[in-house]
Amino acid sequence: MSALKHITISKYQLKNGEVKDIGLSYQTFGLPLAEAPIVLVIHALTGNSNVIGEKGWWNDLIGDQKCIDTNEYTILAFNIPGNGYDNNPENLIENYKDFNARNIAELFSLGLEELDVKQLFAVIGGSVGGGIAWELAALKPNLIQHLIPVATDWKSTDWLIANCHIQDAILNHSNRPLADARMHAMTLYRTPESLTQKFQRTKRESTLFNIESWLNHHGNTLTNRFNLSAYKMMNQILRTIDICEDRGDFLEVASKIKSCIHLVTINSDLFFKPEENWNTYVELKAVKENVTIHEIKSIHGHDAFLIEFDQLARFLKPIFKVQVNAIETVSKCVA
């Protein structure tokens, strides 16, 4: 596993005026920094910077001769501050409501400056990670050659905010906050059809359905490996995605992004609805040529971006196909 490295972002000012030193941890994979095009990977809610290798959560997409080939690219992954992956209690964030998704994008941008990274070949993120990718692109419209938001959106919809509000209530009031919040979330990450296919109303015991056992397992597993304040922080970031806040309307903001934008949506996603992404595509296509959209076909809902690797890789391979002058082709896009 790639060693965890650390940066301190000194005197970072929050929107409420508070100034804090923020610890930012990260890992790199593949070729060394400054020796190859850089792909920034932004993790999802319970994810982390350990993208590939032992316990790597995107091994099927990234690695030796995979879709994103570590023989050709540098993979950089920051941990979202407060996610607890560095095992340092001092870096957990208790005042989570003072942060939003744009803060995380700003911190990542400052981290890139510390690493002397001036150009990113691609930024890819799923779910909340994709929302942060949108925020980074809006913050630094000339930084990213290929913006790849997967199973996400440029804003938190009312539906998403509602579910984050329920999650926050569970996290603050339940006797088993992590387990109960995770069980609720899993019903949103999948679909009724996915659960029917998997369980068929079968029982493990005379009084316990297998779906109940599965939910209990996910709740208990997260309780054993995740921190309560980290979940609260990540849920807060999820509910505050909005590249337009204090900037103008969507087209005004998004049209300034120079990146080739490759939207990846999921036809059965109950969390980040595909209709929102298709509306984004239609709106953007009217003012920006270098926009594409791909739709994963799956019964598995939001989690399909972590399940349907063959489809995702097929969409992304044209982007990451090795080009002799990959670093220099900033203006080129792949349909």
Image (spheres, helix red, strand yellow):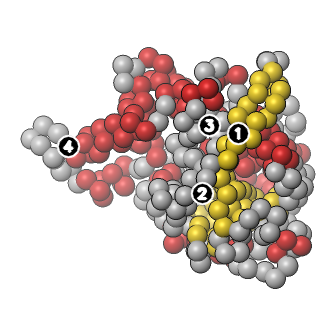
Q: Which residue is mark 1?
A: 24
Identify which amino acid the numbered label 1 is placed on.
Leu
Q: How much space separates mark 1 and mark 4, taking CA atoms?
A: 42 Å
258 above or below 80?
Answer: below
Q: How much space separates mark 1 and mark 3, taking CA atoms?
A: 19 Å
Residue depicted at x 52% and y 62%: 53
Quadrant position of residue 324: bottom right
Which numbered disc, 1 or 4, marks the residue that appears first in the sequence? 1
Instruction: Please tell me the numbered disc located at residue 2.
Output: 2
Q: Which residue is mark 3?
A: 238
Q: Which residue is mark 4?
A: 209
Identify which amino acid the numbered label 2 is placed on.
Ser
Disc number lying in front (1 or 2): 2
Residue depicted at x 30% and y 58%: 197
Residue 296, given in percent of the width and then of the height, sits at: 55, 64
Disc number lying in front (1 or 4): 1
| 24 relative position to 145: left or right | left
Which numbered disc, 4 or 2, marks the residue that appears first in the sequence? 2
Which numbered disc, 2 or 3, marks the residue that appears first in the sequence? 2
Crowding near the residue tagged with mark 2, few <14, some 14–19, many ≥20 C-alpha atoms within 10 Å: some
| C-beta proximity under 8 Å, tags 1 and 4 | no
| C-beta proximity under 8 Å, tags 1 and 3 | no
Identify which amino acid the numbered label 3 is placed on.
Leu
